[in-house]
C-alpha cells in the first residue's frame, strides 16, 4: 500500500513539475507581449531613437537584458541605400521601417540585417540606436550590448544555385544547403508545400530539448500514449503500458525507430498534453521565421491538411537541431538500447536505419545525422546532415521518393555531386 502511495506521490510531483514548466513558458510569452506593446507605443509617440532606447530599457527590465528577433531576407545593400547616404558610427544599430517591422542593420564585421517582430506604426521612424558594445555572436545568437537576437536561420539562392532533377534524383522535392555559407547549392521545388511526415520529429526533439532539465527524469507510459501510436499506425519503440522509462530513452526512441509512442510521451511530459506541445512547436516555427510556410498539428508527422512545411523549412529546422548539442547527439546515434525495466529487463534495441544504410555509400564525406519519414502524400522523405572530406557542412532534405532506398540514393547523389 505504501509503495502505491509513493508512486502516486511521485507521479503527482512530476505532474506538478511539468505544470510549473508550462506556467513559466506562458509567463515568458506574456512578457514578450508586454515588451512588444511598449515598443509600439514608444515608436508611435516617442520617435525612433527615443523609442529604441526605451525598447532596450524595457528588454532589460522584462528579460534581464535579453530580447529576441529573427533575421529577414538578405536585403542589406538595398536597405542601406534607403537611409539617404547616412552611415551609423561604430557600435550603432541602424533602424529602418520596412513592411511593418523594424530593421536593425548592423554595420560591424560580418553581421548584417536584423529585424524584430515589433510593428512600427510610424512610417517616418528611421534613425540610429547607439549601443554600448560592438555586435558579437554568443551561443549561436547575436549579442549587441544588452540586446540578444536569434542567429541567422536563412539560406539564400545564388547565381550558382543548381536546379536538379532526373536522372540525378527521383525525389519530387529537394534542397542542398552549404551550412557554412548559408547558400542553397541545389534545389528542386524546395519551396513547395508538402507533408513532412516523420521528419516532423526533428522539431519535436528540438522543442523538447529547450524545456528539459533532467534527462534521467522518469515518465510512466500510459495507454493514451500507446493507443495514439497504434490507432494511427505509427512506428513504435514498443514501450508497455505502465512502463517507467527515462526522458533520455524518449528522445532516442522518438528519432531512431521514429517511435510515435516515445514522441507522444515526450510531448506530454514537456507540456502536459500533446495539444499544448504542438503550440510550442508552432511558436518555434515562428521564432525561426518559418511560420509563413510551415504549420504543425501533431508531434509525430501524421498526415493532416494543416500539417505542412517545405523542404527548405525542414532544412532550417534541421540546422537549428544540429546546433543544439543534445539534439545533434540524438540525431547522430546509429544504435541504442533503452534502460532496463521490469517489462524489458534487457532494454529495447533500436536503430537509425537511414544512418546505418547510408554509412557505406560513397558520398565523398560522412553523413552524421539523419531522420526519415513516410506518408502516402509525400512518399519517402529524409533530412540529413553531412560533412564533406574538406570539412564543409551540408544539409539535405528530400521528399517524394518512391522507396526508402531511392530516398537514400538521392541524398548520396546530391552529396557526391555537389558536396565538395
Image: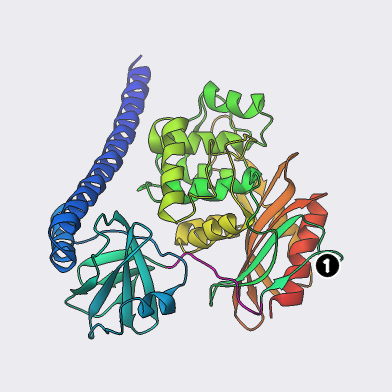
Relative horizontal placement of residue 144, taking residue 41 as reference (left or right): right
416 to 369, vertically: above or below: below
Magenta stretch, residue numbers:
152-160
- Farthest residue to the right: give it: 167
Q: Which residue is mark 1?
A: 168
Q: Any magenta on residue 211?
A: no
Q: Quadrant of the C terminus?
A: bottom right
Image quadrant holding the N terminus, namely top left
- Closer to the camera, 53 or 77? 77
Looking at the picture, how far across and down is residue 189, in whole percent? Answer: 70, 58
Chief secondary structure of the magenta portion: loop
- Give the SS element for disc 1: loop
Front one among 395 and 325:
395
Name the residue located 53 percent from the left edge and 77 percent from the top edge: 181
| Crowd around label 1: few <14 · some 14–19 · many ≥20 (10 Å) | few
Frontmost residue, 133 versus 121 = 121
- Residue 230 in percent (x, y) is at 65, 26
Indicate whether 415 appears above or below 342: below
Q: What count of labels does the image hold? A: 1
Residue 99 can be seen, yes or no: yes
The quarter of the displayed image where residue 391 is located: bottom right
Q: Tell me where residue 358 sits by quadrant.
A: bottom right
Magenta region includes residue 159? yes
Relative image position of residue 359 (x, y in whole percent):
73, 65
Q: How is the image coloured?
A: rainbow
Residue 132 vs 281, above or below: the answer is below
Asked if one can make out residue 245 in the rendered structure from this viewpoint, the answer is no
Where residue 198 appears, x then y in whole percent? 63, 44
Query: Residue at 33% across / 70% down in the picture?
Result: 142
Q: Which residue is located at x 67 percent, y 37 percent? A: 235
Amino acid at each position: 500500500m505504501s509503495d502505491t502511495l509513493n508512486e502516486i506521490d511521485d507521479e503527482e510531483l512530476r505532474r506538478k513539475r511539468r505544470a510549473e514548466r508550462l506556467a513559466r513558458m506562458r509567463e515568458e510569452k506574456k512578457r514578450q507581449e508586454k515588451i512588444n506593446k511598449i515598443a509600439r507605443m514608444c515608436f508611435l509617440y516617442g520617435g525612433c531613437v527615443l523609442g529604441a532606447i526605451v525598447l532596450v530599457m524595457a528588454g532589460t527590465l522584462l528579460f534581464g537584458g535579453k530580447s529576441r528577433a529573427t533575421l529577414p531576407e538578405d536585403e542589406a545593400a538595398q536597405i542601406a541605400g534607403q537611409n539617404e547616404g547616412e552611415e551609423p558610427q561604430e557600435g550603432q544599430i541602424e533602424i529602418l521601417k520596412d513592411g511593418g517591422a523594424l530593421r536593425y542593420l548592423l554595420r560591424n564585421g560580418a553581421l548584417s540585417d536584423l529585424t524584430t517582430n515589433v510593428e512600427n506604426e510610424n512610417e517616418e521612424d528611421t534613425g540610429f540606436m547607439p549601443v554600448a558594445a560592438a555586435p558579437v555572436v554568443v551561443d549561436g545568437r547575436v549579442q549587441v550590448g544588452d540586446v540578444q537576437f536569434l542567429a541567422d536561420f536563412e539560406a539564400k539562392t545564388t547565381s550558382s544555385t543548381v536546379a536538379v532533377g532526373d536522372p540525378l534524383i527521383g525525389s519530387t522535392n529537394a534542397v542542398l544547403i552549404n551550412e557554412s555559407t548559408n547558400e542553397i547549392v541545389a534545389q528542386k521545388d524546395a519551396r513547395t508545400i508538402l507533408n513532412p511526415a516523420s521528419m516532423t520529429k526533428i522539431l519535436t526533439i528540438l522543442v523538447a530539448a529547450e524545456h528539459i532539465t533532467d534527462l534521467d527524469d522518469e515518465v510512466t507510459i500510459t495507454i493514451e500514449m500507446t493507443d495514439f501510436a497504434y490507432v494511427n499506425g505509427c512506428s513504435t519503440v514498443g514501450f508497455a503500458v505502465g512502463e517507467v522509462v527515462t526522458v533520455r530513452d524518449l528522445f532516442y526512441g522518438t528519432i531512431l525507430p521514429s517511435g510515435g509512442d516515445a514522441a507522444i510521451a515526450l510531448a506530454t511530459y514537456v507540456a502536459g498534453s500533446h495539444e499544448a506541445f504542438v503550440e510550442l512547436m508552432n511558436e518555434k516555427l515562428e521564432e525561426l521565421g518559418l511560420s509563413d510556410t510551415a504549420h504543425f498539428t501533431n508531434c509525430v508527422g501524421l498526415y493532416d491538411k494543416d500539417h505542412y512545411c517545405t523542404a527548405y523549412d525542414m532544412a532550417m529546422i534541421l540546422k537549428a537541431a544540429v546546433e543544439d548539442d543534445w539534439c545533434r547527439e540524438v540525431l547522430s546515434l546509429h544504435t541504442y538500447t533503452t534502460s532496463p525495466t521490469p517489462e524489458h529487463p534487457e532494454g529495447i534495441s533500436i536503430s537509425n536505419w537511414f544512418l546505418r544504410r547510408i554509412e557505406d555509400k560513397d558520398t565523398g564525406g560522412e553523413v552524421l545525422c539523419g531522420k526519415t519519414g513516410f506518408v502516402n502524400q509525400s512518399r519517402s522523405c529524409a533530412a540529413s546532415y553531412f560533412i564533406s572530406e574538406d570539412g564543409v557542412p551540408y544539409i539535405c532534405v528530400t521528399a517524394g521518393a518512391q522507396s526508402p532506398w531511392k530516398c537514400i540514393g538521392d541524398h548520396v547523389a546530391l552529396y557526391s555531386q555537389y558536396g565538395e
